[in-house]
Amino acid sequence: MVKFTFLSVALVYLATSVNGVTYTVEVGKGGANVYSPDNFDANVGDTVVFRFVDGTHDVIQSDEANSCAKSARQDAFTTEVMTGSKNASPEAIWSLDTVGPRYYFCNFATHCSVGKMYGTINVLEEGKTPKAPGVIQPDPPVKQPGTPADDSPNVPKSSSTNPSTPTDTGKSAPKSAASVNKPIPVAIVGSAMMSLAGYVLVNL
């Protein structure tokens, strides 16, 4: 019973984590010193992915809006200085685990002090509808199975007539191994799955 309860809690936690929304902030979009978007709402449990698409920038958490001073928090969110790329953008992930605003800025060169490169994430309690939601990261495209190429050579059709039909000797020709269908019994597959489930429960 204890093992079953532990497994149930683990599954519920996993489902809760999966249900969180992932937002995308593009850093340096269009070659400008900007975060796009630079102000939006999210909820506790959501995740923000900073994609460095152009220029050289970083993301540093601050304690006040429109500030260029690093936060005094020991767990303040910070990234390394990254050079953006459109084809293979470096990414940094910020998990939103508490309610309240998150302020951040770019500490590279004079991007904050001169370029006013900073942003805000308004983190709402779980379940509250964001009034100004951010850009939701799209799911990766599903790869469709390709059609196998026909590699067989083009053999011209024979113009000769069909050979005469051999006489019936009373014995049918044996079937080749490739032509005999041997389906895998369903019982074997089911037994393997049950064994795997039992092993997981026993070893929790």
Image (cartoon, rainbow, N blue to C red):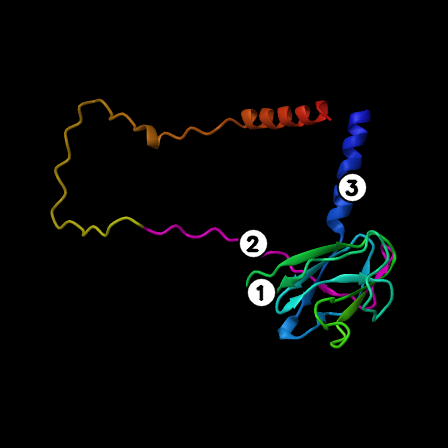
- Quadrant hosting residue 67: bottom right
Is 8 located above or below residue 128 in the figure? Answer: above
Residue tagged by mark 3?
13
Disc sitting over residue 85 in the figure: 1
Q: Secondary structure at mark 2?
A: loop
Disc sitting over residue 142 in the figure: 2
Q: Earlier in the sequence, mark 2 or mark 3?
A: 3
Say which amino acid is labelled 1: Ser
Left or right side of 135 for 5: right
Left or right side of 190 for 136: right
Q: Secondary structure at mark 1?
A: loop
Front in this rendered view, residue 125 or 81: 81
Number of the front mark, 2 or 3: 3
Left or right side of 185 for 109: right
The CA span between labels 2 and 1 is 23 Å
Say which amino acid is labelled 2: Val
Whether residue 39 is visible: no
Over which residues does the magenta segment extend? Answer: 121-150
Who's the residue at 84% across and 60% down the image?
Answer: 71
Q: Image quadrant for the N terminus? A: top right
Q: Are the two marked residues, 3 and 1, in contact with CB atoms closer than 8 angstroms?
A: no
Image coordinates of residue 179 in percent, x first then y, are 34, 32
